Image (spheres, helix red, strand yellow):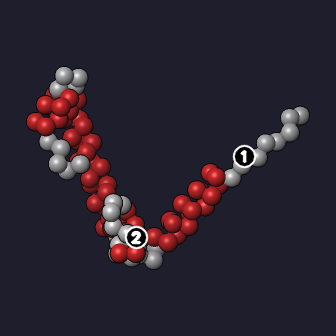
Amino acid sequence: MQQLAEPTLTAALGEWLSGREIRAMLERRDRMGEIIDELVANNGEAAVLIRYGIPPTTAPAAPARAAAGTDLINSLLGAANEAPIIAPSS
C-alpha cells in the first residue's frame, strides 16, 4: 500500500481516472495508514496486522486487552455460522 505513488497509479489507471481521483485515492491511503498506525500503537502489531507466511505461533503475542476483542470476534463468527431462527408466521 505504501509503495503506491501518483506516477504509478496514473500509468496504471490514468485511462479511467483523472488526476484528482488518483490524488483522492492517495489521500485515502494516507488516512488508512494513519488509522492502522494508531491501532498498532494502541493494540500491538499482533492484534492488528496479518503477516502472511508467518505461522501464528511465531508472531509476537497480543496485549492482554486484545483478548476481549478476540472473544467478541469469535462470538460474532459463531453467530454468523449458526442456522437462522425462523419464527412461525402469524
Q: Earlier in the sequence, mark 2 or mark 1?
A: 2
Residue 36: x and y, percent?
A: 31, 57
Q: Residue at x 18, y 44 (%)?
A: 4
Give me the C-alpha separation between circle 2 and circle 1. 32 Å
- Check disc 2 and report its element: helix, strand or loop: helix
* Quadrant housing residue 59: bottom left
The residue shown at (57%, 62%) is 74
**Which quarter of the figure has residue 55?**
bottom left
Residue 27, position as x, y percentages in the image: 22, 41
Q: Position of residue 57 (x, y in %)?
A: 40, 75
| Residue 40 in view (yes/no) | yes
Q: Nearer the viewer, residue 76 or 58?
A: 58
Q: Which mark is residue 56?
A: 2
How many residues crowd around disc 1 within 10 Å: few (fewer than 14), some, or many (20 or more)? Answer: few
Q: Residues within 10 Å of mark 2 (few under 14, many from 20)?
A: few
Q: Position of residue 79 (x, y in %)?
A: 65, 55
Q: Residue at x 33, y 67 (%)?
A: 54
Q: Which residue is mark 1?
A: 84
Q: Residue furthest right?
A: 90
- Secondary structure, mark 1, is loop
Residue 18 visible in the displayed image: no
- Left of 21 or right of it: where is 69? right
- Kindly identify the amino acid type of the residue bearing the numbered disc 1: Pro
